[in-house]
Amino acid sequence: MNPGLSSSTAAPAGAPSVSWRPVMDAEELWIGDMESVQVGDFTIVLTNVDGEIHAFEDRCPHLGTPLSEGDLDGCTLICSTHLWEFHAKTGAGINPGNSRLVTFDTRIDDGQIYVAIPENRGRQLGSEGKGGQTVATHD
Ligand code: FES
């Protein structure tokens, strides 16, 4: 077990319906590491920053480069293509500040990292050049 791991679970009332999907053993994602995983139609990059696991669409909102091909430098996720920077806990754009990554909630249960995948497929993720997109679902 990787002691001190936590997750980014946030389940506000009225949140869209999600399916929690196991993606990898928590002990395989060390502090300072990132890993790309495929979950159904989603390619997701997991980050471990200070023992907190976070999940983002593995696609730069600029021109679509997989973020997992970039660098994780402390709390900063850096795209390998044009060096856009994002906060590796929140997905907020650092440079440029008006960009944003698509985020997924995470949790750790019985040594496994789980990611919350929207159950409704009516989504638009990461369109090019428009900054991050949010997951659109139906009620
Ligand atoms: S594709 Fe990521 S910064 Fe351009």
Image: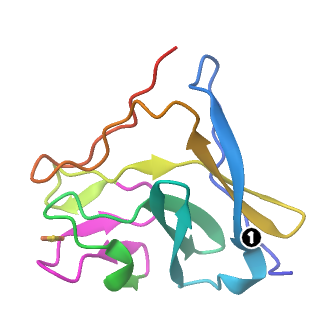
Q: What residue did someone put label 1 on?
A: 5
Locate residue 60, reporting x and y percent. 25, 64
Whether the magenta-drawn stretch holds residue 10 is answered as no
Q: Main secondary structure of the magenta part?
A: loop
> Does residue 102 appear left or right of residue 95 in this picture?
right
In front here: 115 or 41?
41
Whether the magenta-drawn stretch holds residue 76 is answered as yes
Is 42 located above or below residue 45 in the figure? above
Locate residue 75, reporting x and y percent. 42, 73
Picture residue at 52% right of the left edge, 49% below the top: 104
**Residue 89 in view:** no
Query: Can you tell which quarter of the image residue 29 is in?
Result: bottom right
- In this picture, which residue range is highlighted in magenta? 74-91
> Does residue 137 appear left or right of residue 85 in this picture?
right
Q: Is mark 1 within 8 Å of ligand 1?
A: no
Locate residue 134, reporting x and y percent. 35, 38
- Rendered-image quarter of ligand 1: bottom left
Q: Residues within 10 Å of mark 1 (few under 14, many from 20)?
A: many
Circle 1: residue type: Leu
Q: How many marks on residues?
A: 1
Q: Secondary structure at mark 1?
A: loop
**Residue 110 in view:** yes
Picture residue at 20% right of the left edge, 52% below the top: 99
> Does residue 127 appear left or right of residue 53 in this picture?
left
Picture residue at 65% right of the left edge, 85% below the top: 30
